[in-house]
Image (spheres, rainbow, N blue to C red):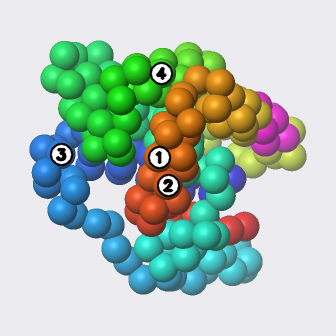
Amino acid sequence: MKSILIFLIVSVGLAAMFVGRDLNMARSKALTAPTVVTSFQTQQQNTIIDGATHPELIPDRTAYSVLFRLIANRRTPEERSRIRAYIRQIGFTDVDVDALIALANEFHERVSPLDAEAKQIKSGNRGIATPELRTQLLQLQRQKEAIVDHLVVSLPDRLSPDGVNQLRQHVTGRVKRRLKYQLN
């Protein structure tokens, strides 16, 4: 559950960083922080993986989810223009830009109802962590993961071969390096 929280915090942070600011500022700023080991209310130790130091330890699924959330659901012309410029900096052609935006919007359409359901479960049960609630939330998380896995597998069918390679390089070399991921 804590990795989901970290994922959501990083998703919102990346979205604000890349879309809410000028792209030149976003390119010049890098999120950096040391690897941290903290103790939460439980006695269990949780390790936070800093992608700047160990990008290979950040799961692909998490990185693609963050990227899809960043790209998806841009409503204003300014937001759409900025996200298109961000995707073009990866080296994409206009056809691949359109395809990636469509894929991210599909992600958003399929995952948003699951996110809303999880939010409703959490808000209706604040402070209560029954095994049934954990099971429900875990099932929703697994459904989201299955959606991401399906979309990532479909990339070669949706993007050009160069686009697929450029996207994988971008996820590995840029997205993962800006994430922090909590192991449970």
Looking at the rendered structure, the secondary structure element under dot 4 is helix
Q: CA distance from mark 2 to mark 3?
A: 19 Å
Residue 20 lies, in percent from the top left, at 20, 39
- At label 4, counting other C-alpha atoms closer than 10 Å, the crowd grade (few under 14, some 14-19, many 20 or more) is some
Looking at the rendered structure, the secondary structure element under dot 3 is helix
Q: On residue 23, which mark appears?
A: 3
Q: Is residue 9 above or below residue 149?
A: below
* The magenta stretch spans residue 142: yes
- Disc 3 marks which amino acid? Leu
Q: What residue is at 21 percent from the left and 63 percent from the top? A: 29
Return the disc, 4 or 1, that comes first in the chain's sequence.
Answer: 4
Q: On residue 166, which mark appears?
A: 1
Q: Nearer the viewer, mark 3 or mark 1?
A: 1
* The magenta stretch spans residue 116: no
Q: What residue is at 22 percent from the left and 16 percent from the top? A: 76
Closer to us: 62 or 122: 62
Residue range (magenta): 135-143
Q: On residue 87, which mark appears?
A: none
Return the disc, 3 or 4, that comes first in the chain's sequence.
Answer: 3
Residue 33 lies, in percent from the top left, at 38, 77
Q: Nearer the viewer, mark 2 or mark 3?
A: 2
Closer to us: 104 or 11: 104
Residue 35 lies, in percent from the top left, at 49, 82
Residue position for label 2: 169
Q: CA distance from mark 2 to mark 1?
A: 5 Å
- At label 2, counting other C-alpha atoms closer than 10 Å, the crowd grade (few under 14, some 14-19, many 20 or more) is few
Residue 56 lies, in percent from the top left, at 61, 70
- Disc 2 marks which amino acid? Gln
Return the disc, 4 or 2, that comes first in the chain's sequence.
Answer: 4
- Disc 1 marks which amino acid? Gln
Residue position for label 4: 99
Q: Determine contact: label 2, label 1, CB under 8 Å.
A: yes
